[in-house]
Image (tube, rainbow, N blue to C red):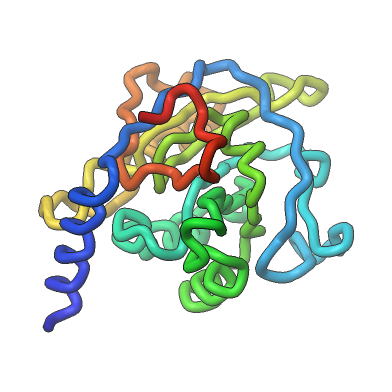
Amino acid sequence: MPSGAILMETVWICSAAMARTASTMLALGTPLPAFRLARVNGDKVNGVQVKAGTFASTDFEQKPILLMVLCAHCPFVKHIEPEITRLENDFASQVQFVGLSSNSLITHPQDGPAQLAEQAQRHGWAFPYLLDDQQVLAKSLQAACTPEFYLFSQDSKDSSPTLQYRGQLDSSRPGNNQPLDGSDLRAALNAVLTGTSVSQKQVASVGCNVKWNPGQEPEWFG
């Protein structure tokens, strides 16, 4: 079976067996949550050693921050992996990228550390890829689906990073024939980097729902 057909069959299974879920659209202006999580793909950031295989919110430099809620198995994530690579190549010198996988390892061990590390290696991702197995950061972000994107930046050198953009990468979904070009997120990144206002017209991301640990689902789930 051709790879495209396999992906579409997997998308159908995702849509049929799991909720096709949209972002909750966390309020703009929300401060960056504090966190320290295990890193699955190395122990350096921009050539600087980070503490004991972890990465924390205090490890960021004074640059815009892009948090990406990803995982290894979701067909919606697989669909956009090439554009994530292009985004990192285009913006990594100006923006701090961080991947985050929060899916339950109880129900979805296929999103474990080894699988995430292999995914990052396969696509050449150099950004920190973090394992949020207790789902604390996902809940702080009110994450709902994979993939989701959260762009934080500072208003001034001494201010804390706040949320400027959340939602979709672009309008491309598996099988809808829309261009995979990251247009929505790229526009937000360029606005932040040039000091202009990010458009308030932001579209929710859509994908497979975050797989919450059994009995620990947040109020916005379901």
Q: Residue at x 54, y 76 (%)?
A: 118
Foreground of the two, 3 or 182: 3
Quadrant showing the N terminus: bottom left
Foreground of the two, 150 or 137: 137
Quarter-of-image position of residue 34 = top right
Quadrant showing the C terminus: top left
User: Does 172 sit left or right of 111 as displayed?
Assistant: left
Quarter-of-image position of residue 203 = top left
Q: Residue at x 73, y 21 (%)?
A: 156
Instruction: In the rendered view, tell whether residue 211 sits above or below residue 51.
Output: above
Foreground of the two, 72 or 81: 72
Foreground of the two, 113 or 214: 214
* Residue 102 percent coordinates (x, y): 56, 48
Instruction: In the rendered view, tell whether residue 172 sits above or below residue 107.
Output: above
Q: Residue at x 64, y 37 (%)?
A: 137
The residue sitting at the bottom extreme is 1
* Residue 25 percent coordinates (x, y): 42, 23
* Residue 42 percent coordinates (x, y): 73, 70
The residue sitting at the front extreme is 215
Instruction: In the rendered view, tell whether residue 19 sits above or below residue 92.
Output: above
Q: Residue at x 36, y 58 (%)?
A: 74
* Residue 150 percent coordinates (x, y): 52, 35
